Image: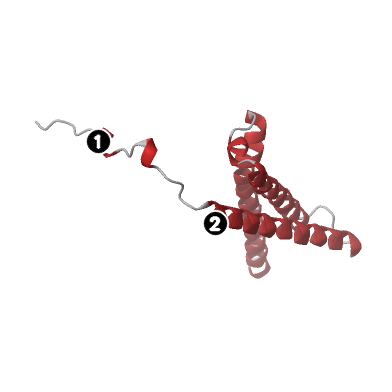
């Protein structure tokens, strides 16, 4: 019977660990992501104003999708703007703020995907009902 080999011998000592990216690259990526998320936020914000301006339906798949995207982009812009000041402090937030900035965007992505699937299913069902009216009568 073989003895279990320990993985402790392959662990790199902390003194030899170096950051994955140099600080200039981190600052560049942080700036890039913050700018992209801010641009997304403002473009979605403009889309919502256009919905009001052209008097589209206020509660529809489009507006719910846009509000989810707006909230997601706002959270991501806020998170990446925290990285400009202090990365360690941004990673050690109060539990509610940690959840809001790190976990809530993932939930929003799930809700957005679910909304898109629901809309797609409705479009497919309406298209099938157009060619097969007995589907609607059976319900």
How many neighbours does mark 1 have within 10 angstroms: few (below 14), some (14-19), or many (20 or more)?
few
* C-beta proximity under 8 Å, tags 1 and 2: no
What residue is at 65 percent from the left and 51 percent from the top? 112
Q: In this rendering, would 97 be left or right of 55?
A: left
Q: 125 or 118: nearer the eye?
A: 118
Seen at 62% across and 43% down, the residue is 107
Left of 20 or right of it: where is 89?
Answer: right
Determine which of the numbered discs, if any, sits on residue 92 in the image. none
Sequence-wise, which precedes: disc 1 or disc 2? 1
In the current view of this chain or complex, which residue is farthest to the bottom? Answer: 131
- The answer to whether residue 109 is visible is yes
Q: Residue at x 80, y 62 (%)?
A: 47
Q: Nearer the viewer, residue 90 or 96?
A: 90
> 135 above or below 5?
below
For label 2, the crowd category at 10 Å Cα-Cα, with few meaning under 14, some 14 to 19 and many 20 or more, is few
Report the residue marked by disc 2.
25
Task: Classify residue 43 by image quadrant.
Answer: bottom right
Q: Of 118 and 50, which appears nearest the observer?
A: 50
Residue 138 showing in the rendered view: no
Residue sitting at x 63%, y 29%: 95
**Residue 135: image location, x then y, percent:** 63, 60
Q: Which one is in front, 54 or 119?
A: 54
From what the image shows, is residue 101 above or below residue 60? above
Q: Secondary structure at mark 2?
A: helix
Q: Kindly state the secondary structure of the residue where label 1 is placed.
A: helix
Residue of label 1:
9
Please state the horizontal and vertical placement of residue 67, each as a whole percent of the image: 75, 51
Please provide percent x and percent y for residue 81.
68, 48
């Amino acid at each position: 019977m073989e003895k279990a080999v320990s993985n402790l011998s392959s662990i790199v000592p902390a003194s030899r660990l170096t950051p994955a990216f140099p600080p200039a690259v981190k600052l560049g990526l942080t700036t890039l992501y913050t700018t992209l998320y801010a641009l997304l936020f403002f473009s979605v914000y403009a889309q919502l104003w256009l919905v009001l301006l052209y008097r589209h339906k206020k509660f529809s798949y489009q507006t719910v999708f846009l509000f989810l995207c707006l909230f997601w982009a706002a959270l991501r812009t806020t998170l990446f703007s925290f990285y400009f000041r202090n990365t360690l402090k941004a990673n050690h937030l109060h539990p509610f703020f940690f959840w809001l900035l790190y976990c809530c965007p993932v939930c929003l992505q799930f809700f957005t995907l679910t909304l898109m699937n629901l809309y797609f299913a409705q479009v497919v069902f309406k298209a099938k009902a157009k060619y097969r009216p007995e589907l609607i009568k059976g319900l």
